[in-house]
Amino acid sequence: MSRADYAEIFEEVKTLLGRFGKSLENIDEEADIINDLGLDSLLVMELVQEVEDAFDISFPLNDLSGIRTVKDFVLQIQKNIEV
């Protein structure tokens, strides 16, 4: 993936969240990953691993501190892909 397309990344993240039992209809860009989607720290780490595999990137753990919403996560993935 040369130029990371936001919409494509968002759809892939939604699909990955669906694997964690999250209803895809309830996942929007402003959904808080912990408060709205109910992922605890272990599930967040599993999600990061899934994202790394899906996008063939290495996600720096210190980047997680600024991520609260699905949109934050997608933008961070996009940034990592484009590096």
Image (tube, rainbow, N blue to C red):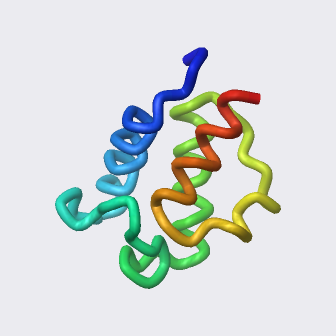
Instruction: Tell me the quadrant of the picture where the N terminus can be found.
Output: top right
Q: Report the residue that reaches farthest toward the left.
A: 25
The residue lying toward the viewer, choosing from 38 and 36, is 36
Coordinates of residue 45 in the picture (x, y in percent):
62, 62
Judge left or right: residue 78 versus residue 57. Answer: left
Q: With respect to residue 13, does 56 lie above or below?
A: above
At horizontal 66% and vertical 31% (from top left) the residue drawn is 81
At horizontal 58% and vertical 48% (from top left) the residue drawn is 75
Judge left or right: residue 32 versus residue 82. Answer: left
Coordinates of residue 29 in the picture (x, y in percent):
38, 60
Quadrant of the image occupied by residue 80? top right
The residue lying toward the viewer, choosing from 20 and 82, is 82
Q: With respect to residue 68, does 29 lie above or below?
A: above
Instruction: Tell me the quadrant of the picture where the C terminus can be found.
Output: top right
Q: With respect to residue 53, does 59 lie above or below?
A: below
Q: Report the residue that reaches farthest toward the bottom.
A: 35
Quadrant of the image occupied by residue 73? bottom right
Judge left or right: residue 8 versus residue 48. Answer: left
User: How many numbered markers are drawn?
Assistant: 0
Coordinates of residue 9 in the picture (x, y in percent):
45, 38
